[in-house]
Amino acid sequence: MKTLLIDNYDSFTYNLFQLLGEVNGEAPVVVRNDELGWEELAASVEFDNVVISPGPGRPDRVEDFGVCAEAIRAAAVPLLGVCLGHQGICAAYGGRVVHAPEPMHGRLSTVSHRGEGLFAGLPRRLRVVRYHSLCAVELPPELEATAWTGDGVLMGVAHRRRPQWGLQFHPESICTEHGRALLENFRDLTAARSGGGGRANRAWVSEAPAPPPAAPQADEPAFELRVRRLDLAADCEAAFHHLYGASEAAFWLDSSRLDGGARFSFMGDASGPLGQTLRYEVGSGELSVRAGGRTGVLRESVFDYLSREMRRLRPRGAGLPFDFDCGFVGYFGYELKAELGGENAHQATLPDAWFVFADRMLAFDHREGHTYVLGLCPRGDRADTDSWIAATAARLASLPPIEVPAWGEAGAERQQVRFELARSHLRYLDDIAACQRKLGDGESYEICLTNRITAAVSPPPLPLYRTLRRVNPAPFSAYLRLGGAAVLSSSPERFLAIGRDRWAEAKPIKGTVGRSPDPVEDARLAAELRGDEKSRAENLMICDLLRNDLGRVCELGSVHVPELMQVESYETVHQLVSTVRGQLRAGLEPPDCIRACFPAGSMTGAPKRRTMAIIDELEGESRGVYSGAIGYLGLGGGCDLSVVIRTLVLDGEATTLGVGGAIVTQSDPEREFEEILLKGLAPMRAIDPAPISSGFRATEIQAEEKWP
């Protein structure tokens, strides 16, 4: 059975896509609400039924609802409207859409129903997830109510004569009970109306098209990977300092905290014979590539270039216990959103993407105590690479101590540092109020608002990073040297990992509480976070958003949530973490998956496209590296990227630190402000254990009793 799924630019549409595909036995056709008029759409696509997706805004605004109103009036096949689609059905026949008694974004309610139609065979009371601040009232005679909450808010409608149904809640959410059964009933109602027959889909390119065939691979790769494993648990700090500390373009992907699931660390630079350094600017569309001592400029997306080069350079698999077998390392900056559905509203000071291609690198297995030396070379031309591997192995076996102290250690130069907020305490509270007005009007479900902390100092980056990894160890720590600039990250959050087996994983973090030095109180705080409705709503919204993003590029039925809202504890905070997994569709590669998921939903909110526009307006400046992603894309098809949070960016004159949090209708503005200071505390303390605030609140951040 074929469903036409009309997308209202929502961030949950592809959860419906996946669930409908499983229920129907074939993928729906997805069309955005402004692609075609209804007559053209009906003539171009054959379908058995129609589903109108959720979305931001109002059904009586053409710019929000597009072709959907016409579909409701003209469709001869069964039609289901979800959330905004449900409101649109009510409005189309004369009902009114008004503000709901209370906004319900990512929150669960118990719904009662009549037990027929979409609800046939289901328990009479269901726990469902709601994402709405508007609701339909004053139903016209053509419609009848089929479901409602305990306080009387309409949750379902059916047309008395036409095969049309509406659901105000979200059947596709991970926490809605019997969501699949609701869509199975819609399928069965469609089949009963058509006598069990189905229609074949015509040749139509949907929003998530089948991928083109992969480029044919040569029988023998043009490059080979040389590897030596050393039974040596090398000191990572000493190894990086002595081998790469003086490099102008170097990386250290550092599992400085090993109990967070991280096992391997990687380091290298662009100095090898095949090495490259990439700098990409969104505004100009220019990609600068430095290789072999020469620099060229291409007008090509960084994603396209990465895909092409990874295919060209891919060696035969080496059977390594990790997925990074030489490749590209660097960051995607937040402003890349302009190529992925967002606006090009602000220009960052650093490149919008920066990568090195490392043809020579080191890998450290912290669990087994092994060190790997890897080198990529043209097939049959091994001598130079093997010599480098031998020389590097010898250096690793006899690393001298580091003579340069870490930042703040005895003998290191240090000064008291003043930190300033880009937007003051009062301005930030005003921005939160503006977010909540947008949420109340149905323009977004959750807005991830951020601020920027700046210190007018730029310490030596490597000594400072050595201090940061002690002060705030994290499973996805990273150090990137970009010539005169540097990125020092202590991120706890995985954005996206893809293994050689093509399984993709995201681990969104939403929900934060400070820790206590008292073990009993600390355990109480963790338990409180686990059960906090606001934190769970924040996390659920982003978990559903990541399911949607992966659902755009993963096999039908493969997207699932093995861990939902688990508490993970770090140096200064407990955080609520979920895990979303899915298997990448055949023919797609890691850059395709990154395109579908970037920027991380935990740094935007949902729906992503509309919410990013709200963020652009309120924040008034670029985020740059912050809110982007740092990590590697390996030649063998693996990748691992973290979300750029808890990260210091040094440009030679100043140090900046992005901080932020999710704003929902339940947010308390003062607590949200306190939370961003808490999140910035550990990186600030790496620079100065007792920082001075300017433009913060009167209660200064060095008050130890307030910042455990």
Image: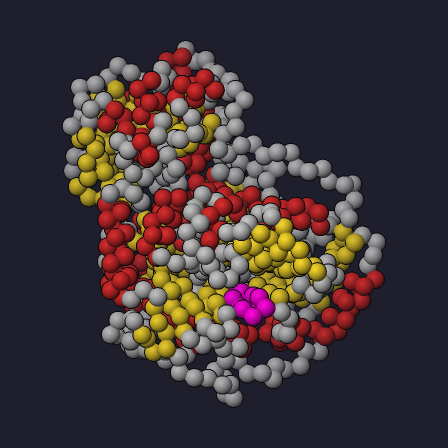
Please say whether residue 645 is visible from this viewpoint. Answer: yes
**Magenta portion: prevailing SS class:** strand
Does residue 126 appear to the left or right of 25 in the view shown? left
Residue farthest along the top direction in this orientation: 195
Quadrant, the C terminus: bottom left
Please say whether residue 671 is visible from this viewpoint. Answer: no
Residue 584 x/y as whole percent: 56, 41
Residue drawn at the location 45% of the way across and 13% of the way down: 197
Colouring rule applied to residues: secondary structure
257 or 688, nearer to the observer = 688
Residue drawn at the location 73% of the way across and 49% of the way down: 316
Does residue 655 appear to the left or right of 96 in the view shown? right
Residue 263 x/y as whole percent: 57, 61
Residue drawn at the location 37% of the way across and 71% of the way down: 681
Mark count = 0
The verdict on residue 409 being magenta is: no
Residue farthest along the front direction in this orientation: 284
Does residue 433 appear to the left or right of 579 in the view shown? left
- What are the residue bounds of the magenta stretch? 477-487
Residue 615 x/y as whole percent: 35, 52
Residue 292 x/y as whole percent: 73, 60
Does residue 517 appear to the left or right of 20 in the view shown? left
Q: Is residue 626 above or below residue 438?
A: below
Q: Is residue 348 above or below residue 123?
A: below
211 or 473, nearer to the observer = 211
Residue drawn at the location 25% of the way across and 51% of the way down: 436
